[in-house]
Amino acid sequence: MTLMEQWQDALKALPLVAILRGLRPSEALEVGEVLVEAGFRIVEVPLNSPDPFDSIKLLAQALGKRAIVGAGTVLNVADVETLHAVGGQICISPNANPDVIRRAKALGLISFPAFFTPTEAFAAIDAGADAIKLFPAELAGTTGLKAMKAVLPKTVPVFPVGGVNPDNMKDFIEAGAAGFGIGSAVFKPGDTPEIVYKKARAFVEGWEAIQKA
């Protein structure tokens, strides 16, 4: 299976990204395993975490084809290249830097930058982004998402990130969300694997309930 096929499968199965900000390499494997056990298929380690590339390498090796693993808060081309070198598969950014997007695509990675305005969204798409995240989603809200979705290409998935919880996912989906990035609501430093599993399952069950409704 190619990475893009794996990506499409993940989008169909459970388009939720676990954002593991603050994750330490010593806990990466346990946290990664419980997330996959809970049903998550996409895992992000932000680069402002302790030794993030060590965690990404460990997770990529351990989770293999069970999950797409990569970095968040990728701000420059050098970090894209390091991400690729350690086996990362997805490049996630809090902004829309065309150089970062193009380099990620040149290296065969999934490019997943952020936007807050239509101008940023179209710049990211023009540079080759595979998906875009609305960040911070709690500021744009469902009204902002719905308005922008009216002009954005339907082929590019939009993931709200920031302030998402199991109770408001349905409203964002109705406004056009294809999936979500989940940060402290699924992991924060100090959480045990048991806590992470419980929090992750709440999101998985919330997503599945919406799909069945």
Image (tube, rainbow, N blue to C red):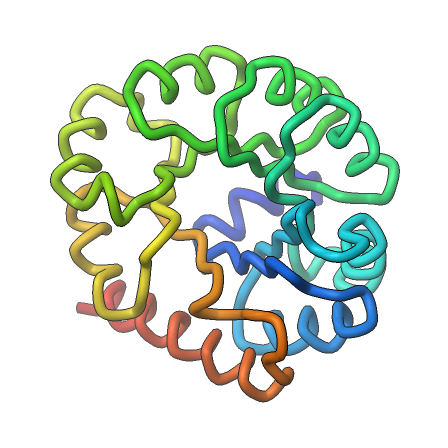
Which quadrant holds the N terminus?
top right
Q: Quadrant of residue 168?
A: bottom left
Q: Quadrant of residue 3?
A: top right
Which residue is found at the position 72% from the left and 18% from the top? 106
Which residue is found at the position 47% from the left and 65% from the top? 184
Q: Is residue 181 left or right of residue 66?
A: left
Q: Which of these two is toward me, 186 or 126?
A: 186
| Count of marks overlaid on the render | 0
Q: Position of residue 172 (x, y in %)?
A: 22, 51
Which residue is found at the position 32% from the left and 14% from the top? 119
Q: Position of residue 121 (x, y in %)?
A: 37, 21
Q: Is residue 110 above or below residue 14?
A: above
Considering every residue shown, the one lying at the far bottom of the view is: 194
Q: Position of residue 113 (x, y in %)?
A: 51, 31
Q: Is residue 142 above or below residue 74?
A: below
Q: Which of these two is toward me, 33 or 54?
A: 54
Q: Is residue 105 above or below residue 188?
A: above
Q: Position of residue 210 (x, y in %)?
A: 24, 66
Q: Which of these two is toward me, 67 or 9?
A: 67
Q: Is residue 120 left or right of residue 29?
A: left
Which residue is found at the position 64% from the left and 83% from the top? 193
Q: Is residue 101 above or below residue 74?
A: above
Which quadrant holds the C terminus?
bottom left
Q: Quadrant of residue 31?
A: bottom right
